[in-house]
Amino acid sequence: QAQVVESGGGSVQAGGSLGLSCAAHGFTFTIMGWYRQAPGRQRDLVALITTGGTTEYALSVKDRFTISRDNAKNTVYLQMNSLKPEDTAVYFCHAKDRYGTDFWGQGTQVTVSS
């Protein structure tokens, strides 16, 4: 079954770091990235990367978060540094295959305490 599987997340104090990973199973992604949703807020893009290496970041995380990929493992990584309480949210992995089909992960909680 084609799906994305997330790992990582957790709780950290402000200024700390966390990492997320997302592996695509059963398909090859063309674009993969992370979105986040805080309580009462809409789901917003955090960062994405294409298989060609093009990246895009939300302004709020630029220079703090780094997205990278391992095409051989069909996996994308998000390194989150200098975390702030406002980064607290459920983080969702999203991917598209070459047909434009969307795949979403189940979400993983990231909590940053002040």
Image (spheres, rainbow, N blue to C red):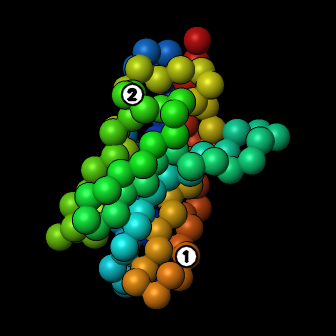
Extreme residue in the left direction:
72
Residue 105: % across, % down: 54, 64
* Residue type, label 1: Asp
- Local secondary structure at mark 2: loop
Q: Which residue is mark 2?
A: 64
39 sits to left or right of 44: right
* Residue type, label 2: Arg
Badge 2: few (under 14), some or many (20 or more) residues near its Cα, within 10 Å? Answer: some
Q: Which residue is mark 1?
A: 102
Q: How many marks?
A: 2
From the viewer's perspective, is residue 83 above or below residue 30?
A: above
Q: Quadrant of residue 23?
A: bottom left
Can the viewer see residue 44 in this picture? yes
Q: Earlier in the sequence, mark 2 or mark 1?
A: 2
Q: Quadrant of residue 39?
A: top right
From the viewer's perspective, is residue 26 above or below residue 23?
A: below
From the viewer's perspective, is residue 20 above or below residue 88?
A: below
- Local secondary structure at mark 1: strand
Using the numbered discs, state the Cα–Cα distance from disc 2 to disc 1 in whole angstroms. Answer: 27 Å
Can the viewer see residue 108 in this picture? no
Residue 84: % across, % down: 53, 20
